[in-house]
Amino acid sequence: MDERTAARDILAAARRLVVFTGAGVSADSGVPTFRGASADALWGKYDPYQLASPQGFAADPKLVYDWYNWRRSQLAAIHPNPAHNAIATLQARGAAVITQNVDGLHERVAPPGCMTILRLHGKIAADRCSVCEYAEQIDLHNLPALRPCPRCGEYLRPAVVWFGESLDPAVWRAAETACKNADAMLVVGTSGEVYPAAGLVRLAARNRAKIILINLEASPFDDLVDVALNRRAADIMPQLI
Ligand code: APR
């Protein structure tokens, strides 16, 4: 049996499917990934500590905020790709989606009534205050500048989880519960290098979920997977649905 057929069979038999995604699922929409062979990989060109940590923001809030606005400006011009649409089909059949992505592309095609998408690392199209938790949505087509929180005066920062920050406890608990109960997990486009998020794959496997991995490069999950497809997500995903 070829890998595609094996993956299709696992997805068809799954009753409690979790789809776990990383930046690779959005790569075919033109969103740069963070790591890997791509020349556009963000952490190959920029210092994550300087641009994606509370310390970096404290050191130079305008540099960090302008860099996120650069990323936001890119997102304003892109669209979900066939991988997002295929995942939306799985959501319509009851699958849960847990994503490390902040780009909002899953949300743009999610079917009505589907389970809430669990965004582990927050949302780039929003700002929040680190002190008083004031938050506001951002219009990607009308980007604001670095500005003080209207409630407490602290600078507003992108509503994403930076290195060294904790995930939202409620989101994390829901993600853990979904993975403990899953009978299958479809892992799409993640290097599996960032914890605690990456630990969810091992958690699902420990609970006897079948693991399908779609990734362009080798990943730390290779010993766990039942089916590995080293293909572009936008190409292979529609063939699995
Ligand atoms: N199809 C499938 N896989 C792809 C594609 C594609 N078209 N393009 C790239 N990939 C794979 C790469 O081979 C790589 O292994 O997707 C993976 C992307 O890995 P990362 O860039 O590390 O992204 P991710 O795993 O989501 O990073 C996790 O790190 O910096 C933090 O907060 C950030 O959420 C992010 C977290």
Image: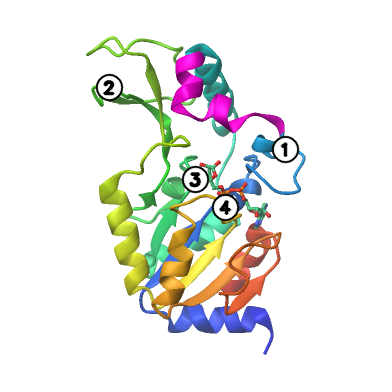
Whole-angstrom CA distance, mark 2 to mark 1, is 33 Å
- What range of the chain is rendered magenta? 45-59
Whole-angstrom CA distance, mark 4 to mark 1, is 18 Å
Image location (x, y in percent) of residue 27 = 64, 47
- Would the CB of label 4 be found within 8 Å of ligand 1? yes
Q: Earlier in the sequence, mark 1 or mark 3?
A: 1
**Residue occupied by mark 3:** 101
What residue lies at 43% left-to-right and 53% top-to-bottom?
196
Whole-angstrom CA distance, mark 2 to mark 4, is 29 Å
**Residue occupied by mark 4:** 193
- Would the CB of label 3 be found within 8 Å of ligand 1? yes
Q: Contact, CB < 8 Å: mark 3 with mark 2?
A: no
**Would you say 75 lies left or right of 110 here?**
right
Image location (x, y in percent) of residue 81 = 59, 51
**Residue occupied by mark 2:** 131
What residue lies at 29% left-to-right and 26% top-to-bottom?
135
The secondary structure that dominates the magenta segment is helix
**Residue occupied by mark 1:** 40
Q: Residues within 10 Å of mark 1 (few under 14, many from 20)?
A: some
Q: Is residue 54 magenta?
A: yes
User: Along the line of sight, which residue is nearer the eye, 125 or 224?
Assistant: 224
Any mark on residue 13, and which?
none
Q: Contact, CB < 8 Å: mark 2 with mark 4?
A: no
Q: Residues within 10 Å of mark 3 (few under 14, many from 20)?
A: many
Q: Residues within 10 Å of mark 2 (few under 14, many from 20)?
A: few
Whole-angstrom CA distance, mark 3 to mark 4, is 14 Å
